[in-house]
Image (spheres, rainbow, N blue to C red):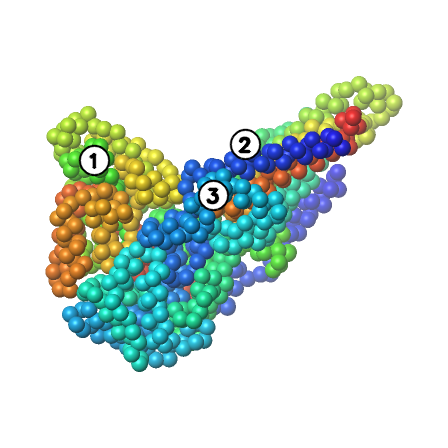
Amino acid sequence: MRYVLKKLAVMLATLLVLSFLSFAAFEMIGDPVTTILGTNATPEAVAELRAELGLDRSLFVRYFEWLGRFVTGDFGTSYIYRLPVKGMLGEKLVNTLVLTLMGFALAVVISIPLGVVSARNEGRWLDRFLTVFNQIVMAIPSFFVAILLMVVFGLVLRLFTPGTFVSYKDSPGAFLIYMLFPAISIALPRVAMTEKMLRTSILEEMQKNYVRTAYARGMSRRTAMKAHALKNAMLPVITFLAVGAAEMLAGSIVIEQIFSVPGIGRLLMVSIGQRDVPVVEAIIMILAVWVMLVHFISEILSEAFDPRMRS
Amino acid sequence: MKRIAALALSLLTAVSLLAGCGQKSPADQRKAKNEIAVGIAQDLGSSLDPRSLASAGAREVLFNVFEGLYKPTSSGDFVPALATDCQVTDEGKTYTFTLREGVKFHNGKAMTADDVVFTFKSYAESSTDSNLKAALGAMADVKADGNKVVVTLTEANSDFMAYVASIHVIPSDYAEQETKPVGTGPFRYESRSVQESIVLVRNDDYYGTKAKVSKVTYKIYETGTALVTALAGGAVDIVAHMTEQQVKGLSKDYTVLEGTMNLVQALYLNNAEGPLADVRVRQALCYAVDVQNMLDLTAGGHGTRVGSSIYPAFKKYFDASLADAYPHDVAKAKDLLKQAGYENGFDLVITVPGNYTNHVDTAVVLASQLKEAGVNATVQEVEWNTWLKDVYQGKKYQATVVGFDASMLTAGAMLNRFVSGSSKNISNFASAEYDALIAEASSITDDARRTECYRAAEKILSDEAANVYLQDMADFVAIRSTLDGYHFYPLYVMDLSTVGYK
């Protein structure tokens, strides 16, 4: 219990520092007034809008006002759209989460079986093929994978039409089909790395004494791998996947722009460009909480797989 | 494990097959419903109120929703729209507009003279556009007289019709212009979804020729890649403001139209900064630059060379000969630099907003051309907001490459900014002679003399080498081959009322 409380305190402190830093960063790069009013604006209009948005007050006043509201669950109002930030995030957050979770699920479902198959067939042609394939996939950044997928499946095979995103509210089926390809682009580089990691990890475990004991008890290589080595080999992989889940959310920022998925990543990029501080703050907080949450879950999972870590 | 892998694979195949068969392409579906989709590069701002439309992008979209008493045509004239006639009396100080009968706003209300009077007063009070506000500041009175509206000015302004055309008539008793704009145009506003789309539908009560398509969906794609793939995949039917590179790869499903951007792209110079304060140095830069070579390298030779701050669509004011005022001559450039005491050259930083690929490309070519003349030019890319803050407002820069357009068809909208002391005078240009000409031009009614003044002012910008003038950029529009009726305007607008399926 004390451990959890300590952990929570660290999390809150991190969020506090992070929120202030991102608030202060915008202080240096200017406000959204010119973006809103354009280059032909009258000086009176500029002053009036600045006062209306409360930008004529000091950084600290604005920060603590924002913080006070944020802790009560009020994310504020967008400078650019004059809409409640919460409402703007709603559907976009769902899109990004679906994209990330789909990517994550794909990565797990594909990489773990492949890792096992590769380890089982160590040194044979299948293993060699997978190793070469991995090297290639790892070398390609995910945004380029995204462009390739879009050209091949979107423009040549015409399995989907790039740029015609459908909301899950209108048609869940079409939504999932459209999301499949961006999800693959996020998952693919992860698949390669996870597969390689699991293969190495399994092969290392197979050299250990407890596996030799298992052989001595008459177990086949295959059963020993399945019953004993795999569970231990999964430990580093889980931590790695957890880091991956956090990175995938970050990766979706780029992928969303390429596939024109209206998610929080795309919103974040545009909002930074437009100096829409309340939106940026809210998204940064969401991303931070997500990263911390994922790491927390990975710790719990690691404990489940390795009783030694429970103490 | 094998089973899971097999399941995943078969699911993947099934989903792909489902997506692929038994459906008409999105483009055909739109055609069947007589709808079009237009790709645009940025969302409109929070307010759709015509009195506070700041961005050129917003004006481009809402041109289809709003109209003035007069409206601009694609050839740059003004024709009656919500008025049927206008009489100018009292030496250009009184404008009497006769209103068109039977015009309805999109909310069903009939337009009256009171609405027009309200619109003029409201613009004078709360327009965020400084040019328009200044012009309306000279309005002494505006009143309704039966079916007529009489506008009285304190002094004559022969650009006044251009301003009238950009004053969009709105109903006097409607408070939701910011979120649900109501005008009289060929399309009415239907809905928007932040950073996704804006939907307009045909106004079936329109008094004039009705729009051909029944619905227009503007879709927003922030990156060039997303925009081009949306086009290639058939998600949109029309995309404007494309580059030569982008249209080169398009399939035969599209027709590419070439117009002009209607702006003046130049290497704008801070005339108050170090070596650039010397006119010989600025002239040297003009000689050092090879505009044709730059056009060849950045746009396959497309674009119209200009020699001052007026673009060719202003037929009356544009002086084509100024484009040849400084032919490419490196020896002469070096000579001028020597006279000015910079025989070993100097360092020149060209600050460019990185989101404008066109301007960045141009800056890179110019930098290498300037190096040949001994000027150590480097390109510094900055973000758009940083550019606005440091360069446009702060004037803390040496040189920059951007394009300036006109929000309305007045020479003043292009030339007034270079009056000394103006907050928009990005070049810190200062010439008493220039100031006098502009002041005279904006206060007299004799059109011939006014044109003379503007043309003389233009020539001063060239003689003094206020900036290194480059071009009016080529504007490529990709339009689905099944559509036609697209017209270019001398303004940054896109008229969709004439576009329709063949």
- The residue under label 1 is B276
> How many residues crowd around disc 2 within 10 Å: few (fewer than 14), some, or many (20 or more)?
few
Residue A294, position as x, y percentages in the image:
66, 37
Give the alpha-carbon distance from disc 3 to disc 1, as whole Å. Answer: 34 Å
Q: Secondary structure at mark 2?
A: helix
Which numbered circle lies on residue A139? Answer: 2
Q: Which residue is mark 3?
A: A272
> For the point 63% across and 36% down, which residue is it?
A12
> Disc 1 versus disc 2: distance between alpha carbons?
48 Å
Q: Foreground residue, B381 or A282?
A: A282
Q: Which secondary structure, mark 1?
A: helix
Tag 3 secondary structure: helix
- Asked if residue B154 is positioned above or below residue B269 in the image, the reply reads below
Q: Residue, x 47% and y 43% (percent of image)?
A: A272
Q: Amino acid at mark 2?
A: Ala
Chain at tag 3: A
Look at the image and tell me in which quarter the N terminus of chain A lies.
Answer: top right
Name of the residue lying farthest toward the right:
A217
Q: Work out whether disc 2 and disc 3 sit on a shared chain.
A: yes
Q: Label 3 sits on what residue type?
A: Ile
Instruction: Please state if B164 lies on the left or on the right of A103 as rendered.
Output: left
Is B40 on the left-hand or right-hand side of A182?
left
Dot 3, crowdedness within 10 Å: few (<14), some or many (≥20)?
some
Q: Write down the chain letter for disc 1.
A: B
Q: How many marks?
A: 3
Q: Quadrant of the C terminus of chain A?
A: top right
Which is nearer the N-term, disc 2 or disc 3?
Answer: 2
